[in-house]
Amino acid sequence: MLALLLAFWPASAAADTLFYQPLIRDAALTADQWQQLWQQAQRDGYRQVIVQWSAYGDERFSAGDWLLSSLAAAQQQGLALVIGLAADPQYFRTVQQPGWQDQFSSYWAGMQRQSLLEQQRLQPLLAARGIAVAGWYLPAELSDRLFQEGRRRQDTLTQLQELASRLDRPLHVSAYSTGVLSPEGNASWLSGLEQAGLRVWWQDGEGTRELPAPVRQAYRQALPCAIGVVREAFSQVSVADAPFQAVPATPQPPLPCHTDAVFSLRYLPWAGVLRQGGPIDKSHQSLDRD
């Protein structure tokens, strides 16, 4: 089966950057399995791993030592590490509650405070392992639906700049499009974030296919080269209002001039040990995937 999957995985599918989304069940992997995963990632040309989060609500993935051990193994293979901070499992539900617009600024500021505290908690743990941090990643995904109002976009940019100024490495953020902003409007918004000093990634939406193919293409083509593109290597199989489920799929070819990433390690042909618990990945949900 692995040979069959690899046969349909073109060399161009690999990228410079690979996303990894920690789940509790990943603690069952052995040191040898992690080493094999990171070795294969390095062989395929990946040079950087973005770990989507290190805390998910009350769950601290570094508490049981397995995540730190895995990251140390990744570094030994020459992979640079961008470490995700604190994710709120209720993020997408919270911003759909009645009256959320009036509370969003304080809620967003609270999430960023939690991420700053998580970064401060992580630093000595990473240093004790000799793990170098290339950047930090904010797990709260940005969408044009949530940030369709110009004032909210500006307020959030100010808050993100404040968070970035308190970190010792660049702050990475990611965004996805739902068709609320035009392709040009979306490109302008993301370009503003990038010009403010953030490392910005745009998710191509090929896995969820919420937007028609021509629309996705229009969004891709409008992006300035400075915005990184995350190519989704999965296909959503769940229906609306059901728990999010996805299976591996070959991502779209990379775009010229853009920094390139693949989401995610779990869906790669040679990462079957990460899928042993089944196709359900309840974590990667947007406003319409919940």
Image (cartoon, rainbow, N blue to C red):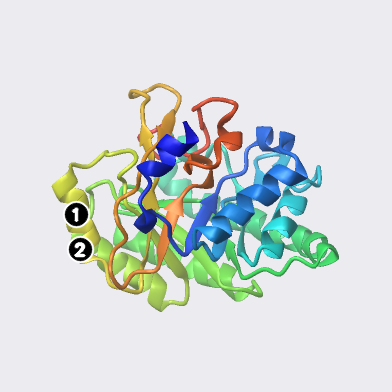
Cα separation, mark 2 vs mark 1, equals 6 Å
The structure residue drawn at horizontal position 71% and vertical position 63%, both measured from the top left corner, is: 76
The structure residue drawn at horizontal position 43% and vertical position 43%, both measured from the top left corner, is: 6
Image coords of residue 146 (percent x, y): 36, 48
Residue identified by numbered label 2: 221
Horizontal arrangement in the rendering, residue 123 relative to residue 77 (left or right):
right
Image coords of residue 250 (percent x, y): 35, 44
In this rendering, is residue 225 above or below 184?
A: below
C-beta proximity under 8 Å, tags 2 and 1 = yes
Horizontal arrangement in the rendering, residue 127 relative to residue 147 (left or right):
right
Amino acid type assigned to the residue bearing label 1 in the image = Gln
Would you say residue 135 is visible in this rendering?
yes
Of all residues shown, which one is farthest toward the right? 128
Horizontal arrangement in the rendering, residue 122 relative to residue 128 (left or right):
left
Image coords of residue 61 (percent x, y): 72, 44
| Viewer-closest of 175 and 144 | 175
In the rendered image, the quadrant that contains the C terminus is top left
Q: Residues within 10 Å of mark 1 (few under 14, many from 20)?
A: some
Amino acid type assigned to the residue bearing label 2 in the image = Gln
Q: Residues within 10 Å of mark 2 (few under 14, many from 20)?
A: some
Residue identified by numbered label 1: 217
